[in-house]
């Protein structure tokens, strides 16, 4: 007798659908160079005006914007900065980010202009009789240390003043803007990954995509 292999009339195969997590520059929100320069100039001018009037709001807001646009750190990381996290000794231009995303800490490099700004702010805090010991918060208001929400409101306020605000394009867009600009400098994804604190280089890969500004450059004097 022959052994006959019998197969079911219909073979039910469970299909899995994998959603692509790949992103491109078309899917992230960021500000171009001119917009970032406008934001920075506007907040800096407000700080200068407030300083002359012995008011504190603009002075604090300007440092927040300076940090966000020159480091790409997250809002929660800005709110959590302590006075002792500024590494500005001889030959040092660094900022220690404690308890970042995933409870991971890291040290990032900062430009000399931000180092000077941070040192000047610490001196200003001393003149204002604010505590500046190692674990004291850098940003303190009347109700205590600033929260992430307080930082978000500052950014939203100026974006609305400059008519740059739109849903999904506010605080986190500054982080994307920093990453786009940093990658443009040397095309070094590893540097971008380290500065942003990404666990995987795949997360950073998005910034290697061609931006609309790069395409516009190529289109100049076309034909």
Image: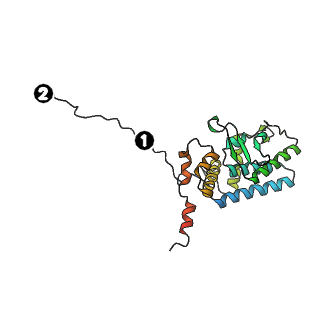
**17, above or below 23, in the image:** above
Give x and y (percent) for residue 145. 77, 38
| Residue at the image position 53 percent from the left and 46 percent from the top | 202
Q: Nearer the viewer, mark 1 or mark 2?
A: 2
The answer, for residue 31, to whether it is visible in the render is: no
Tell me the crowding category of disc 1: few under 14, some 14 to 19, or many 20 or more residues within 10 angstroms, Cα based. Answer: few
| Residue at the image position 31 percent from the left and 35 percent from the top | 13
The answer, for residue 98, to whether it is visible in the render is: yes
Instruction: Decide if residue 19 is on the left or right side of residue 108.
Output: left
Query: Contact (CB < 8 A) between labels 1 and 2?
Result: no
Give x and y (percent) for residue 61. 76, 49
**174, above or below 80, in the image:** below
User: What whole-number distance in Å separates the C-alpha atoms at marks 1 and 2?
Assistant: 43 Å
Q: Which residue does the numbered mark 1 point to in the structure image?
A: 18
Give x and y (percent) for residue 83. 79, 41
The quadrant holding residue 181 is: bottom right
Instruction: Decide if residue 134 is on the left or right side of residue 31.
Output: right
Query: Looking at this view, is 144 or 67 the one in front?
Result: 67
Q: Secondary structure at mark 1?
A: loop
**Which quadrant: the N terminus?**
top left
| Residue at the image position 64 percent from the left and 47 percent from the top | 195
| Residue at the image position 64 percent from the left and 36 percent from the top | 104
Tell me the crowding category of disc 2: few under 14, some 14 to 19, or many 20 or more residues within 10 angstroms, Cα based. Answer: few
Query: Looking at this view, is 131 or 147 the one in front?
Result: 131
Give x and y (percent) for residue 133. 82, 37
Instruction: Decide if residue 135 is on the left or right side of residue 180.
Output: right
**137, above or below 110, in the image:** above
Query: Looking at this view, is 162 or 117 the one in front?
Result: 117
The quadrant holding residue 97 is: top right
Q: Which residue does the numbered mark 2 point to in the structure image?
A: 2
């Amino acid at each position: 007798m022959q052994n006959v292999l019998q197969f079911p009339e219909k073979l039910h195969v469970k299909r899995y659908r994998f959603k692509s997590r790949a992103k491109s520059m078309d899917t992230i929100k960021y500000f171009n160079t001119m917009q970032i320069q406008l934001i920075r100039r506007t907040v800096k001018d407000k700080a200068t005006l407030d300083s002359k009037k012995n008011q504190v709001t603009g002075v604090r807001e300007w440092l927040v914007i300076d940090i966000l646009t020159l480091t790409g750190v997250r809002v929660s990381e800005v709110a959590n900065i302590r006075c002792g996290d500024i590494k500005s000794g001889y030959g040092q231009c660094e900022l220690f980010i404690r308890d970042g995303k995933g409870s991971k800490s890291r040290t990032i490099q900062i430009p000399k202009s931000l180092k000077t700004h941070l040192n000047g702010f610490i001196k200003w805090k001393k003149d204002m009789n604010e505590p500046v010991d190692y674990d004291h918060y850098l940003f303190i208001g009347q109700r205590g240390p600033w929260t992430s929400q307080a930082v978000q409101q500052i950014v939203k306020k100026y974006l609305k003043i400059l008519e740059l605000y739109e849903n999904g394009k506010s605080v986190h867009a500054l982080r994307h803007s920093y990453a786009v600009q940093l990658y443009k400098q040397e095309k070094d994804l590893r540097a971008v990954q380290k500065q942003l604190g990404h666990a995987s280089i795949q997360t950073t890969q998005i910034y290697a995509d061609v931006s609309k500004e790069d395409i516009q450059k190529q289109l100049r004097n076309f034909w």
